[in-house]
Amino acid sequence: MTTGEEPHGTPGLPGLRLNLDEQLEGIAQQLRSLARAKDRLQGLLSAVLEIGGDLDLPTVLHRIVTTAMDLAGARYGALGVLAPSGDHLEQFITAGLTDEERAALGGIDFPHGRGVLGHLIHHPEPLRVTDIPSHPASVGFPPGHPPMRTLLGVAITVRGEIYGDLYLSERRDGRPFDEDDEAVVRALAGAAGIAIENARLFGYMRDSAEQFQRLLLPTLPDLTPFSGAAVYRAAAEPASVGGDWYDAVVLPDLACAAVIGDVVGHDLHAAAAMAQARNMLRALLYDRQTPPSEVLTQLDHTVHAITDLPVTTACLVRIEPSTDGWMLHWSTAGHLPPLILTPDGTARYLHAEPGIPLGVDPDIHRPDHTRQLPPGAIVLLFSDGLVEHPDHPIDDRLNALAELAAAHATQPLDALVHALADHHPSDGHDDMAILAIRTPREE
């Protein structure tokens, strides 16, 4: 007989629906978790690419902090770099502070690793704190410090040694940092160690290349009665030893000879060729007190005969005594023209017919040019790394250099050449050399 009841042990229709809803909700929750995990993984991969996309160490360190903040949704972030002793912080890079918050901390030294920050230094395991003031190691915040309650700290290791600690505080949603935050920041810290090592290696190679280049370039001798100054800046690429070179000397006939040159290429071969050309040119200047074009032609023949010199541009000038003061006598080998700065504030390029570069055909004639110079005039020679920029025409960059040089022309020559190198109108991706010679002033 039918009673209208379900058989014993068989769930009713409402129970089936409830069970199905629970299963569907569970599946939906898993899908949402998978989606979040996928988004976080994609964010992590993008962050790794971002922090590894630069080789300037300060930029890399700051980018590590900001990307960690983005991944964990943190309002504040910092990276403390350990001192060589490993017991305190010698550098502290912060992000997330507003201008007002930074102003409130004005005059307060950066943290050196006391309190909770110091706990991570001495116990380099991931640290999650839900209430900083209640932590046993807490020593409180300095006056003006923004209130912070939560903390996530992870050590960064470079070549097996602790380099520093990455700190995050205050999730934007107000919740404490969780295991997922810790996992993704730990993964980022691993990639950060590689990015830091790459940036440090780049800095070492760049500094070594620049030091090597400086050893090949001369220290300007006493040019009395003239005065002179020069500066060299290495290219932005790692180990990019360049071929830019300069030299100046007062010759037995009382003329001052000065040259700027640029060997094509950025490698040891270019640097060695630069040194050879400079040495040979100085010998020719002393041996042959002839017009600059003849000296360049002789140099071209010489290097063709005894060495394999790459294509080289150069501008050679002689500043010679004349009845009216000083005469500039110059010739170029495919190089940019000299820039003349006169005491009245005028800046003018000496545009003239250029000769072909060295290393092309030593039998092609190069023209000479002359220009009268007043007392106290500055002859400025420079390589193309000072003005070349892929986004601007060369004439635009030359005009910018002329304006910059005119603005600093009244400074001592050493300050002038350094100002030009510091504020160059180029993109900075090529090495640059600058040489300035001033004619004697009127007594």
Image: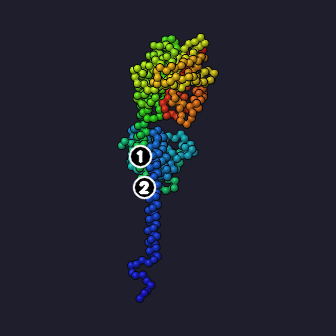
Determine which residue is flagged by label 2.
Answer: 179
Q: Quadrant of the C terminus?
A: top right
Tell me if residue 365 comes above or below residue 182 in the rendering.
above
Label 1 CA crowd tier, 10 Å (few <14, some 14–19, many 20+): many
Picture coordinates of residue 135 (x, y %)? 44, 52
Q: Is residue 93 above or below residue 260?
A: below
Of badges 2 and 1, the one in the foreground is 1
Q: Amino acid at mark 1?
A: Ala
Q: Is residue 183 visible?
A: yes
* Helix, strand or loop under label 2: helix
Can the viewer see residue 129?
Answer: no
Secondary-structure class at tag 1: helix
| Mark 2 → mark 1, Cα distance in angstroms | 19 Å
Q: Earlier in the sequence, mark 2 or mark 1?
A: 2
- Residue found 51% across the figure and 55% down from its top: 174
Q: Quadrant of the N terminus?
A: bottom left
Where residue 238 is drawn, which disc sits there?
Answer: none
> Which residue is located at x 56 percent, y 42 percent?
103
- Tags 2 and 1 in contact by the CB under 8 Å rule? no
Please give the residue where the numbered disc 1 appears in the rendered image. Answer: 191
Give 269 or 149, whichever is nearer the viewer: 269
Residue drawn at (49%, 32%), measured in percent from left and top? Answer: 430
